Image (cartoon, grey):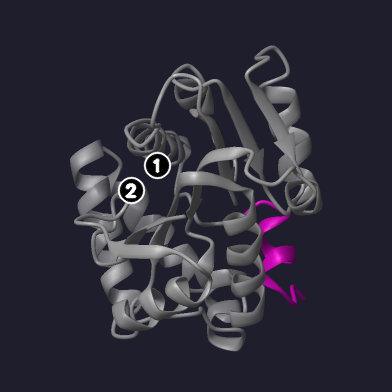
Amino acid sequence: MVTSWREFWDRDTPIYVNARHKARHYAGLAKDIAALVPHPDAVVLDHGCGEALSADHVAGLCGRLLLCDASPRQREALTRRFSGNPAIAVLSPDEVAALPPASLDLVVANSLAQYLTAAELDACLSDWRRLLRPGGRLILADVIPPHLGAFADAAALLAFARRDGFLPAALLGLARTLVSDYRSLRRRLGLARYSETGMLDRLAAAGFAAERMPRNLGHNQGRMAFSARV
């Protein structure tokens, strides 16, 4: 039995209903992240990057792209996928924590906060605050508000699938999710949720000047994104 979110993400998951869903998800995220790159020489960290299938698009617009994921399996796959791209480096969370202070221009943490405890998130915020250069920016995205449930997530997925041409697969995928580890883990471990005010207060306590962004990264606009500056 899977006992933690980290263990869940270290293996094949039912989150993506087919290859098109996965490709369109990562292409959309890469487009959103690329739009945030502050200048061509920027050092960018994508923390909790997952498979990052379109990371080369982001890497082409910055000086250095650091991909971090807690899953050893994901890191091995990322290293193979981007071994020919000298602008991309794959790091573990411990390696990120060991980076020199004030060495990053942009940190993006998308769909990460919900899988961390409050203490784990605070530790990440402390690390990111230390690693960002003066004027650097943290984007904390896909944050789940308290009122948003699984039904709203499913509706957002179906709307995304209808737009991008994988609706039948999405309907089948949702049925599979009902009997998957993801559903049972979501029930047993839960997902961390934050109100807008609660997340702004947490970011301020970590030393950031923060605001909610007009839109979330990715397709699910029921979730929130925050921009926080050093």
Q: Position of residue 132 (x, y in %)?
A: 56, 47
Which residue is tagged 1?
Answer: 25
Tell me the chief SS of the magenta region. loop
Among numbered discs 2 and 1, the one appearing first in the sequence: 1
In this rendering, is residue 46 above or below 206?
Answer: above
Magenta extent: 1-13
Is residue 216 toward the left or the right of residue 182 in the image? left
Task: Tell me which amino acid carries mark 2.
Answer: Gly
Is residue 63 toward the left or the right of residue 144 in the image? right
How crowded pointer 2 is (Cα within 10 Å; few <14, some 14-19, many 20+) is rated as many
**What residue is rendered at 80% in x and 49% in y?**
98
Is residue 49 toward the left or the right of residue 16 in the image? right
* Mark 2 or 1: the one toward you: 2
In this rendering, is residue 126 above or below 65?
Answer: below
Q: Position of residue 48 (x, y in %)?
A: 60, 52
Q: Position of residue 78 (x, y in %)?
A: 69, 32
Task: Tell me which amino acid carries mark 1.
Answer: His
**What residue is rendered at 72% in x and 34% in y?**
90
Residue 223 belongs to the span the image colors magenta? no
* Res. 56 mark: none
Which residue is tagged 2?
Answer: 218
- Specify the quadrant that holds the N terminus: bottom right
Residue 180 visible in the displayed image = no
Identify the element where label 1 is drawn. helix
In this rendering, is residue 195 above or below 144?
Answer: below
Mark 2 and mark 1 residues within 8 Å of each other at the beta carbon: yes
Kindly report the distance in space between the C-alpha atoms of the residues bearing marks 2 and 1: 7 Å
Q: Quadrant of residue 82?
A: top right
Identify the element where label 2 is drawn. loop
Numbered-mark total: 2
Residue 78 visible in the displayed image = yes
Q: Quadrant of residue 158?
A: bottom left
